[in-house]
Image: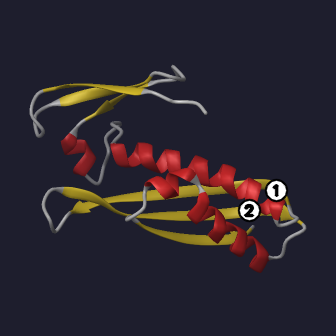
Amino acid sequence: MATRTARTAWKGSLNDGSGTVDLVSSGVGTFDVSFPRRAAEDAGGVTSPEELIAAAHSSCFAMQLSAVVAEAGGTPQSFDVTADATLRPDPEGGFRIAEIKLTVRGTVDGLDNDAFIAAAELASTTCPVSKALAGTAITLDAALS
C-alpha cells in the first residue's frame, strides 16, 4: 500500500513562531500554520493540524461509506460529509483533539434511512482515519438527504 508524505518547516517559539505545511506526495499545496491561529476561533487564513485531520477524516469516511453502502446492497449517489475536529486543553497537560463530529447527508439508491444510518455507523468505526484516532470521541450525525 502507499505511503503519503507531508512536511512542515517551523521557525520560532510556539507562541511567536510559524510554519508552512507542504503536501509533498500530491504537490497540491503549501499551507501556513501558527499556534495563535490554531487556538483562535477565527483561523485567519491559516490552517491547523485539526483542520488537516478533519479533511483526512471526512474524505476517508466518505470513501469507506461508499464501500459499506455497496456491501449493504445500496448504490451510493452522493455524500456531503463534514468533520469538525475540536482542540481543547488536556487535563493531563497541553492540548488534545477532544472530539470529532462527523455529519453526513447522503443520496443512496436501495437503502432506507435506517439502513443508511447503520452503514454510516459501520463506516465511522472502520475507516482507517477513525482507527488512527482511537481514543478520540467520534460522534456521527447521519441521514439521507
Residue designated by label 1: 76
Is the N terminus in the top left, top right, bottom left or bottom right quadrant? top right
Viewer-proximal residue among 42 and 134: 134
Disc 1 versus disc 2: nearer the observer: 1
Q: Quadrant of residue 75?
A: bottom right
Residue designated by label 2: 106
Residue type beneath disc 1:
Pro
Crowd rating for badge 1 (residues with CA inside 10 Å; few <14, some 14–19, many 20+): some
Q: Position of residue 80 (x, y in %)?
A: 66, 55
Q: Position of residue 115 (x, y in %)?
A: 78, 75
Measure how far apart labels 1 and 2 are at the Cα level: 8 Å
Label 2 residue SS: strand
Circle nearer the N terminus (1, 2): 1
Residue at x-position 20% and y-position 30% = 18
Crowd rating for badge 2 (residues with CA inside 10 Å; few <14, some 14–19, many 20+): many
Q: Are marks 1 and 2 in contact (CB under 8 Å)?
A: yes
